[in-house]
Amino acid sequence: MQEKLDQWLNWVEYDEVLAGRHNAPHNILGLHDFGKGQVFTVFRPYAQKVFIMNLSGKNEVELEEVGEGSGFFGLYVDGNKYKAPYKVKVQYSEDDIIEYVDPYCFGPQISSDDLYVFAEGNHYEIYDKLGAHPMTINGVKGTYFAVWAPHARAVSVVGNFNMWDGMLYPMRTLEVSGVYELFIPGVEPGAIYKYQILTRQGEILMKADPYANYSELRPNNASVVADLTGFKWSDKKWMEERAKKSRNDLRQEPMAIYEMHLGSWRKKDDGTEDGFYNYRELAPMVADYIKDMGYTHIELMGIAEYPFDASWGYQVTGYYSPTSRYGTPEDFMYFVNYMHENGIHVILDWVPAHFPRDAHGLGMFDGQPLYEHPDKRRGEHPHWGTYIFNYAKEEVENFLLANGLYWLKKFHIDGLRVDAVASMLYLDYGKQDGEWLPNENGGKENLDAIKFFRHMNEQFEERAPGTIIVAEESTAWAGVTSPVQFSGLGFTFKWNMGWMNDFLEYMKLDPYFRSGNHNKLTFSMQYAYSENFIQVLSHDEVVHGKCSMINKMPGEYEDKFANLRTAYGFMYGHPGKKLLFMGQEFAQFQEWSEERSLDWGLLDYDMHQKMQSFVKALNKLYADYDAMYYNDYSTIGFEWMSCDNADMSVVSFVRRGTTAKNQLLFICNFTPVEYDNYRTGVPCSGKYTQILSSDDVAYGGTGVQNKKTIKADAIECEKQEYSVEMNLPPLSVTVYKFDYKED
């Protein structure tokens, strides 16, 4: 029998197994037909004896060690009485005996078609193939592992189920794809694992799974096997309604977004180091607050797993893994489902621009640049200290495209805000001369990133209809939200960074100096319809010494609040969807920090409580009148009544919705001066009824009084045939509703 085994053995492969560098171990390990019998081989270093048996434990037979102390055991058996799968019993000592089903008797679960489409960059559900997936094969439960590592010499699965020994579970490479795979029976959800990668230079790397669905809590950084199939969603109607909506439908709907960082929104006061609430604990607290405040959407910072808290989730190591800081993937599903049950849309911040250098992450994944561009002039951000994705490589493009769809489909996320788009579009972004490489035409545009965005947005719209994709793009790149068929990038919306910068610079000024900077207030309407904008006052504006929103405002205590109410009122009246970062709604004085909770205690103070009430009133106004949102991206939706009254720092404008009824007139006074008998032009005759004043005492204002309803006079003013007269409160926004009449 030993002679038959020797005839079958390929001694080159035998040496490769013993050296830990075989990349096709199924060729020599497991069960193989040979002549009129079968060959069984098992590699278990340090074992004294090895046996095989059928799954019921019968027909046990001992294998012989091939070479003393090699750990390689084999046996030729006449006939075909054994069938896969079968068990292996390993005896290390009299008291140390283990049994397991042999991993090397199972076929691959990834087809040639899967590999081909992945190599093309078009496998949009590759996350169901690569990664770690609990499954049952031929009646045997276990976990299927698959990883892309084309430059590796060999890859093994290591974890708490095999003593982190890379000799025990070497993986098999499939065709010429660079994909390695192995089904390991008995490995269950909760198992901790990594991939041990032997590079072509002989270095051993320990890498987390790029497609892992769950990760250890930092500072630990291994991947965790997770089963995503068990959660019972109850948002079927929500998802069906979502899928019916076109991009145009979404642009005509209200969007009042509350941007939040889950870990610092609220913290437990229980003495624990982090004080984090679980996703399930957060769900009812967040939903109740969002509904009470009248927001329509939440936008979550930093959910994909990341090692460094102060990166806020924008330096990702686990792109397919909801951060374990707040619980499990199933817990996060519960959170999203709960939001949907309460009518709240969920947007995630998503970072396909760059990734950190952490040793367990994507960088130099298989010993060579894989996910990053190999030329450091294309593959590194010198100032951020991160790697840049290689968008020219199809498998990398596939990794990112599938990742976006993974969140939209597997976790029912309603939209993605794509971070740092400008850094992807420009090859010279944040770089000095000599630090970047021009494109093939000699320009600074990243042609591969442009192609990626167009491919991405086409597929997201087709495969996850009704979802929104938002670009955080800080330059004047043309066509960010134009359709791909018209040579645009195809995003649904774009953050209006230009407006944010100009407007905040204006609001920081002492009112005395605002008259000389009036263009900072009005300039945004020159380009308001060039893209589908979201007006944002985001987290980036209240960190790193920039001051909180309330502390940006000039003046004494009450003036700061009046300025901030005026700022918010103008923002809500301006065309574009709305976003406020958490804490801004009640005028938190401290800058935001991920290390501490929001200062909820401020709501014990009158002015902070009244500021919160004002934002709540703005959200109600926004929801009640479609003039506030329906025509955000059409010129019919907005008209200046007065935009050149720089001396008084006053502007007025009209917002129009779907009908001639319930149109809105905004009058904004950016000085602390009350103007009695102030007259402003209006678009038509009729009655104008005040529906909101930021100067109301209920919101902390001075309480300047006007008649609730004012009749327009046939007096020409500001190039309008009709006008109204009122007492204009200091530092205020006043809103009137009216029905448009043709005279």
Image (tube, grey):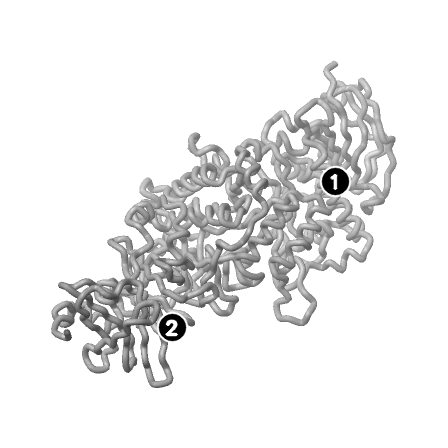
Residue 600, compared with residue 238, is above or below; it is below
Q: Amino acid at mark 1?
A: Phe
The answer to whether 387 appears left or right of 284 in the picture is left
Residue 398, compared with residue 675, is above or below; it is below
Q: Is residue 590 visible?
A: yes
Q: Position of residue 130 (x, y in %)?
A: 38, 55
Residue found farthest to the top: 743
Callout 2: helix, strand or loop?
loop
**Structural distance between the alpha carbons of marks 1 and 2:** 68 Å
**Label 2 packing within 10 angstroms: few (<14), some (14-19), many (20+):** some
Quarter where residue 489 is shown:
top left
Query: How many dots with numbers?
Result: 2
Q: Determine the residue positioned at 51% across, 67% down.
A: 218
Callout 1: helix, strand or loop?
loop
**Label 1 packing within 10 angstroms: few (<14), some (14-19), many (20+):** many
In terms of depth relative to the viewer, which is nearer, 286 or 230?
230
Q: Position of residue 673 (x, y in %)?
A: 81, 40
Q: Determine the residue positioned at 83% across, 41% down.
A: 696
Mark number for residue 670?
1
What quarter of the picture does the N terminus occupy?
bottom left
Q: Is residue 498 visible?
A: no
Q: Amino acid at mark 2?
A: Asn
Residue 455, compared with residue 358, is above or below; it is above
In terms of depth relative to the viewer, which is nearer, 10 or 90?
90
Q: Mark 2 sits on what residue?
A: 162
Q: Position of residue 189 (x, y in %)?
A: 46, 63
What quarter of the picture does the C terminus occupy?
top right
Q: Nearer the viewer, mark 1 or mark 2?
A: 2
Q: Determine the residue positioned at 57% across, 37% down.
A: 241
Q: Position of residue 97 (x, y in %)?
A: 36, 79
Quarter where residue 618 is shown:
top right
